[in-house]
Amino acid sequence: MAVCARLCGVGPARGCRRRGAQREQRQEGPADSEPDTDSEEERIEGARLGQGEAPAPGPAARAPLSLLELPPELLVQIFGSLPGTDLPSLARVCSTFRRILRTDTIWRRRCREEYGVCENLRKLEITGVSCRDVYAKLLHRYRHILGLWQPDIGPYGGLLNVVVDGLFIIGWMYLPPHDPHVDDPMRFKPLFRIHLMERKSATVECMYGHKGPHNGHIQIVKKDEFSTKCNQTDHHRMSGGRQEEFRTWLREEWGRTLEDIFHEHMQELILMKFIYTSQYDNCLTYRRIYLPPSNADDLLKPGLFKGTYGSHGLEIVMLSFHGKKAKGTKITGDPNIPAGQQTVEIDLAHPIQLPDIENLCNFNELSRIVLEVQEQVRREQQEEEEGQDEEEGGSRQGDSQQVEQPVQRDDAGAEGTEAAGVAAAQESALTSQPFVLPVGVISRNEDYPRTCRMCFYGTGLIAGHGFTSPERTPGIFILFDDDRFGFIWLELKSFSLYSRIKVSFQNAEAPSREAFDEMLKNIQSMTT
């Protein structure tokens, strides 16, 4: 404090009482005037330049030696440019700073610059709520829940985006478009909202159901996990009972009635999902997810995609790149392959050259090509494992250098072959080639692209109901354009089409590559 006192000119030796009285007289104007208005800028400029008069020579012309000698209007500008988290410490320096920091102009600027609040916060004054209250009791308090989250709803998962929306913090649940329209925009509905109606504390409201906002609760478990609870679940019930609730849910979830769905197995899956998800009554636990980091040499921009999954409808998948591999991780899932599991893996080191359009229609011909690549991959993995065993054995015998040299030459040769293959695939991508699904391959969406850029060998995860007997089976990844790709599941004779989710999500970037990889492990462990 002694250092702060010397810096700021606090103490009887510097006559702070006299200056304090002068400052109080200058502060009698409106406390919440905007710092960036013309009139205030003129006052600041006038104070700094002596209202246009040349400074007199001698001691009166010296530059200010402390912050307290600056005009209050200029201090408002300076304090308003600091992070809001630093201002409480600044208020403890002296009573003058504490008085200036009560100015709403400072906190209005922090709300705008840190959280994007552009609304006129002055209208809150009639309720007795200051901009400082909005910052401290709403925005700063709940800052840890802003961003993307995955709810723990068994195998189904989900995608929640928590944002500052005006004077509210709202949790929006993002839903894929109705099956099978994969290119349509995402749908979303509010699950909860937080706002400041009185000065004491923020109010949490549940938005689930069709009877409007009602009392809710949010508990921040830790930095990357929080939970919601509805305190009035009777607002979720409908007068027509469960039948009316199911019909309403079906129209919202699938855009149709049960009579429109003729496939009996699909009807069972839909009914199962309704029974399972409705039991939570918006009492959920959420875990943070990050958008995948990108590199300049990625095959396409990573991110979130909507994909077709047969009778399960559309699901959300996150595409990320990991060296020579690309992975598709489910953000939403189903009873066979739950959310969090890696649905597809693409081997970027093994491009596939499609046959001409006539032979491409022959499923057996395409299957033969893919299985040949699968065998090649198996041999390369076996050789790599044998090389590692020889390297370990040579190290134990003390002759590691002689053993390591041929292994390094083999790896270099393999890497050169892989690089040449990828380069050839990228060259062929400059000219699109015709594409058609082989006869017998089932697709939920017949409106798939008829040209593609390149293809790669990959594997897809399949399993029985309840994620029983999971196994990775061969397939082919097809890149159509910057926003769409597909995957042919050879064993299932099925085709999935994926389309990019074109939404700009805020507060969703991973702090590091390691943090993103750790997040993938965490969401996968939830369903393993």
Image (cartoon, grey):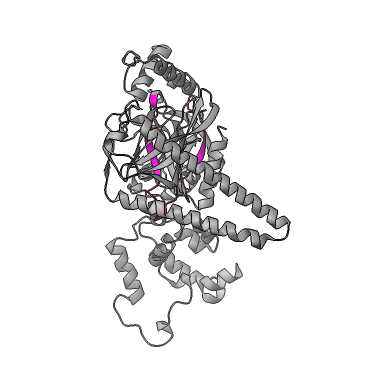
Magenta span main SS: loop
Can the viewer see residue 297 in this picture?
yes
Q: Nearer the viewer, residue 439 or 228?
A: 439
User: Is residue 368 rendered to the left or right of residue 87?
Assistant: left
Can residue 197 be seen here? Answer: no
- Asked if residue 252 is positioned above or below residue 436 in the image, the reply reads above
Q: Nearer the viewer, residue 311 or 277?
A: 311
Q: Nearer the viewer, residue 236 or 324?
A: 324
Residue 404: image x %, image y %?
62, 59
Whether 449 is drawn above or below 348: the answer is: above
Is residue 129 highlighted in magenta? no
Image coordinates of residue 272 in percent, x first then y, are 46, 18
Q: State which quadrant residue 255 falls in.
A: top left
Percent x, y of residue 109: 38, 55
Q: In x, y percent, where is residue 14?
A: 52, 75
The C terminus, quarter of image: top right
Q: Is the N terminus in the top left, top right, bottom left or bottom right quadrant?
A: bottom right
* Residue at horizontal 40 percent and vertical 51 percent from the top: 421
> Up-down: is 203 above or below 290?
above
- Residue range in magenta is 281-310
